[in-house]
Image (tube, rainbow, N blue to C red):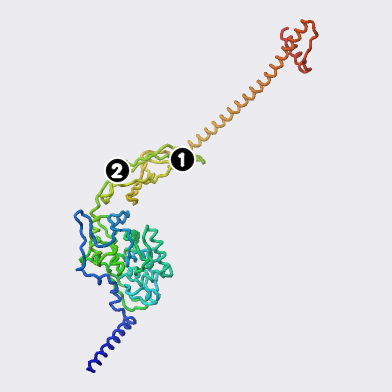
C-alpha cells in the first residue's frame, strides 16, 4: 500500500516537473506547435460539422440563415442587397482586425519595423490568439499584416497599434475616427484585435463598409487573400513561423470552399459567437458579406455561401440611361478685356446608352440622376466636347458618372473682331456724348432765348399800358403821369427811334 502511494506521488511530481520543463524549453529555445498555430482560437473547438445547420431558401425564395445579423453589399456602389438586422449592434471578435489592418496599410510601409513590448506580449487577454512573439522581437509590417489577417494574432495587433499611435488606447481612438469617415453609424472600437470588451461593438453593415474601403488597398488584399505564408527567423526566434489562413472558405480542398471567394476574416469569442466577413467576385460583380453572432464556425460558411449565391443571382443587364435622354442647355461666354461676351446657349446630352449589370431593384424608375455641369461654359465649345457629368444614383449610392457632351457649338469671337467691336463701341459712345452735349447746348440756348423774350414781353406790355394811360389823360385834358423808370424811358426811346428808322 505504501509503495502504491509513493509511486502515485512520484508520478504526480514527475508530471508537474516535466510539463514545466517543456514550457520553459518552448519559451527559451523553440516555439511549440500549439502556440505557433494559434490553437487558442476556440472557433473550431466549440462546434463540430455535425452541429452545422444548413442555410436554405424558403418557399418564397428568401434566405434562411443561422446568424443573428448579416448583410451583403455591392462592393462598388455600397447598395445593400440583403440585410438581416444589419444595423443591430454585436461584438465583432476578430473581424475587428480588418479595420486595424486597413489603418496599418494606410499609415505605414511594408518595410517598417515593429518591436514588441511587454504590453503586446502579455497584455492581450487570456485565451487570445497569437503567434507568440517575444518581448523585444522585431517583425516588419508585411509580416505583421499576414500574422494579423491569416493567424488572427492579437499580440501583433497591439504591436502595430503601438507603432502607429504609441498606445493601443490612442490607436482605438484612431479606429473610431477612421470608421466614421467610412460611414459607420453604430460602432465603437475599444482595442485593435476584438478581444471581448463591453465597449467594443459594431454592426454587420458597418463592417461591410469598412471592408469596402479596405479591398481598394493592394497591401491589404495581399494578406487578406493569402493562403500560406512563412515568417522567417527573427532577432529572437531561430526558427521559421509557417502561417496558414484560418478561413476554410478560401481552401479548395475544404467542403466549405467557395469558388468566387477573394478574401476572408474569421472571428470568435464566447460573447460574440462566430463572425465572418468575406469578399467575392463573379462576372464583374463584387460583393461583401458579413455575418455576426452566428452559431458555429461552419455555419458562418454555409450562411455566407447561400447569401453570396442568392445575391449574385439578383443581377442582370439593364439600360438605365438611353442615348440622347439627358438634354440640357448651358450658356457659353467669352471673356475679353474684363468684359463678358455672351456666345449663346449650348445644347448637350449623353451620347451613349448606359447599360449596367445591376440588381433587379435597380431600374429606370428607381434611379435618380443629378447633373454636375457649370452654370456657364467659358470659351469656345465644339460639338462633342465634354461639358459636364450626369451622375446616376440608386438609394443614395453612386452607380455611374456619364459624360455630357455638346450637341451644338459656341465659337469664340476672333480677337481682331473684338478689337474692331471695341473701337466701334468707343466711337458710338463718343457720338452719344457729342449728341448729348449738342442737345444740352440747344436746351440752354432755348432757355436763355425764352428768358430774354419773356423780359421784352413784360416791357412791351407795360409800355402799351402807359401809352393807353397817356392818351386817355391827353384826351381828358389832364397832365399825363408817366410811371416809368429812367431805364425804361431810355429803352422806350431807343425802341421809338428804331421804329422811326424802320418806317422812313
- For marks 1 and 2, give the one nearer the viewer: 2
Residue found at the far bottom of this picture: 2
Looking at the picture, how far across and down is residue 366, in whole percent? 30, 47
Tell me the tag on residue 75.
Answer: none
Q: Is residue 216 visible?
A: no
Q: Mark 1 to mark 2: distance in Å? A: 32 Å
Residue 208 is drawn in which quadrant? bottom left
Judged from this view, the residue extending furthest toward the front is: 1
Contact (CB < 8 A) between labels 1 and 2? no
Figure label count: 2
Horizontal side of 408 relative to 55 (left or right) equals right
Q: Is residue 43 visible?
A: yes
Query: Residue 41: image x %, image y %?
Result: 29, 72
Figure check: 229 above or below 9: above
* Mark earlier in primary sequence (1, 2): 2
Dividing the picture into quarters, in which one does residue 259 lie?
bottom left
Of residues 431 and 222, the one nearer the viewer is 222
**Quadrant of the drawing holding the C terminus:** top right
Residue at numbered disc 1 = 334
Residue 379: percent from the left, percent from the top?
A: 44, 42
The answer to whether residue 497 is left or right of residue 367 is right
- Asked if 305 appears above or below 360 in the picture, the reply is below
Residue 7 occupies which quadrant of the picture?
Answer: bottom left
The residue at 28%/47% (across/down) is 363
Near mark 1 (Cα within 10 A), the count class, few <14, some 14-19 or many ≥20, is some
Q: Secondary structure at mark 2?
A: loop
Q: Is 57 in front, or is 109?
A: 57
Q: Residues within 10 Å of mark 2 (few under 14, many from 20)?
A: some
In the rendered image, the quadrant that contains the N terminus is: bottom left
Residue that numbered label 2 is attached to: 322
Residue 420: image location, x then y, percent = 50, 34
Q: Helix, strand or loop at disc 1?
A: strand
Amino acid at each position: 500500500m505504501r509503495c502504491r502511494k509513493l509511486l502515485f506521488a512520484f508520478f504526480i511530481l514527475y508530471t508537474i516537473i516535466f510539463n514545466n520543463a517543456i514550457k520553459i524549453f518552448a519559451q527559451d529555445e523553440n516555439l511549440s506547435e500549439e502556440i505557433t498555430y494559434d490553437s487558442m482560437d476556440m472557433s473550431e473547438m466549440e462546434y463540430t460539422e455535425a452541429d452545422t445547420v444548413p442555410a436554405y431558401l424558403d418557399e418564397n425564395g428568401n434566405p434562411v440563415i443561422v446568424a443573428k445579423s448579416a448583410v451583403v453589399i455591392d462592393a462598388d456602389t455600397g447598395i445593400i442587397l440583403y440585410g438581416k438586422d444589419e444595423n443591430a449592434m454585436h461584438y465583432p471578435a476578430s473581424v475587428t482586425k480588418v479595420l486595424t489592418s486597413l489603418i496599418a496599410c494606410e499609415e505605414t510601409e511594408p518595410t517598417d519595423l515593429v518591436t514588441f513590448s511587454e504590453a503586446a506580449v502579455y497584455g492581450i487577454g487570456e485565451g487570445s490568439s497569437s503567434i507568440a512573439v517575444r518581448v523585444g522581437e522585431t517583425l516588419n509590417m508585411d509580416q505583421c499584416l499576414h500574422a494579423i489577417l491569416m493567424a488572427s494574432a492579437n499580440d501583433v495587433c497591439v504591436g502595430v497599434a503601438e507603432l502607429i499611435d504609441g498606445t493601443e488606447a490612442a490607436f482605438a481612438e484612431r479606429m473610431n475616427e477612421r470608421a466614421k469617415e467610412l460611414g459607420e453609424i453604430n460602432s465603437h472600437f475599444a482595442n485593435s484585435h476584438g478581444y471581448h470588451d463591453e465597449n467594443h461593438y459594431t454592426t454587420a453593415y458597418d463592417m461591410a463598409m469598412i471592408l469596402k474601403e479596405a479591398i481598394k488597398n493592394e497591401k491589404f488584399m495581399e494578406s487578406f487573400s493569402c493562403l500560406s505564408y512563412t515568417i522567417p527567423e527573427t532577432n529572437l526566434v531561430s526558427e521559421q513561423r509557417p502561417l496558414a489562413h484560418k478561413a476554410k472558405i478560401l481552401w479548395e480542398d475544404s467542403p466549405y470552399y467557395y469558388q468566387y471567394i477573394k478574401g476572408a476574416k474569421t472571428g470568435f469569442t464566447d460573447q460574440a459567437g462566430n463572425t465572418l466577413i468575406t469578399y467575392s467576385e463573379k462576372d464583374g460583380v463584387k460583393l461583401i458579406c458579413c455575418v455576426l453572432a452566428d452559431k458555429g464556425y461552419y455555419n458562418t460558411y454555409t450562411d455566407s455561401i447561400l447569401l453570396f449565391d442568392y445575391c449574385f443571382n439578383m443581377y442582370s443587364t439593364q439600360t438605365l440611361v438611353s442615348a440622347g435622354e439627358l438634354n440640357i442647355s448651358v450658356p457659353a461666354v467669352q471673356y475679353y478685356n474684363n468684359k463678358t461676351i455672351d456666345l449663346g446657349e449650348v445644347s448637350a446630352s449623353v451620347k451613349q446608352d448606359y447599360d449596367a449589370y445591376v440588381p433587379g431593384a435597380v431600374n429606370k424608375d428607381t434611379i435618380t440622376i443629378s447633373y454636375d455641369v457649370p452654370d456657364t461654359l467659358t470659351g469656345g465649345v465644339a460639338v462633342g466636347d465634354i461639358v459636364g457629368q450626369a451622375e446616376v444614383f440608386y438609394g443614395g449610392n453612386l452607380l455611374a458618372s456619364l459624360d455630357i457632351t455638346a450637341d451644338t457649338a459656341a465659337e469664340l469671337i476672333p480677337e481682331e473682331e473684338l478689337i474692331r467691336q471695341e473701337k466701334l463701341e468707343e466711337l458710338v459712345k463718343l457720338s452719344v456724348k457729342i449728341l448729348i452735349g449738342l442737345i444740352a447746348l440747344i436746351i440752354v440756348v432755348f432757355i436763355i432765348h425764352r428768358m430774354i423774350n419773356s423780359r421784352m414781353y413784360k416791357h412791351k406790355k407795360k409800355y402799351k399800358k402807359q401809352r393807353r394811360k397817356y392818351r386817355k389823360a391827353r384826351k381828358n385834358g389832364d397832365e399825363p403821369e408817366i410811371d416809368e423808370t429812367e431805364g425804361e424811358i431810355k429803352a422806350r426811346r431807343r425802341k421809338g427811334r428804331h421804329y422811326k428808322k424802320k418806317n422812313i
